[in-house]
Image: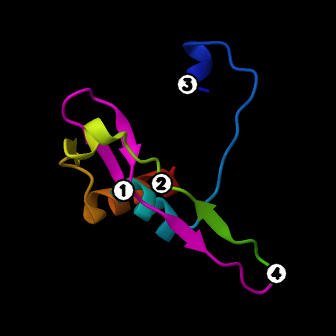
Amino acid sequence: EILEGVTEIDLVINLKLREDVLIAKCLGRRICGQCGGNFNVASINIEGENGTPGIYMAPLLPPPHCASKLITRADDTEEVVKERLRIYNYM
């Protein structure tokens, strides 16, 4: 509803993932300190159980010239990510 006041929206998709996967992906975020590129070093590979599908999310690795310059955002800690998810789930 808030976005409708800013731009025209044709479609909204709400993706649902297990909390452990969301936390792992958030904690895998990296930024190149030189070019500002965004990457994700987390590799998720969870086999499905009892009829549920598995989850595979390959990492988004940086090119060689960025690999040694990756930094983690100061607020990308497990505690902060869990608090973000708690607030999101409350809304």
Pinpoint residue 87: horizontal percent, then vertical percent.
Answer: 41, 53
Counting residues from the start of the chain, the first of labels 1 and 2 encountered is 1
Does the segment drawn in magenta span residue 41?
A: yes
Q: Amino acid at mark 1?
A: Gly
Kindly indicate whether the residue at mark 3 contacts the one at mark 2 (C-beta within 8 angstroms): no
Quadrant containing the N terminus is: top right
Tell me the crowding category of disc 2: few under 14, some 14 to 19, or many 20 or more residues within 10 angstroms, Cα based: some
Q: Amino acid at mark 2?
A: Pro
Q: Nearer the viewer, mark 1 or mark 2?
A: 2
Tell me the crowding category of disc 1: few under 14, some 14 to 19, or many 20 or more residues within 10 angstroms, Cα based: some
- Residue tagged 4: 51
Tell me if residue 81 comes above or below residue 38 in the rendering.
Answer: below
- Residue tagged 2: 59
Q: Secondary structure at mark 4?
A: loop
- Residue tagged 1: 28
Q: Nearer the viewer, residue 91 or 44?
A: 44
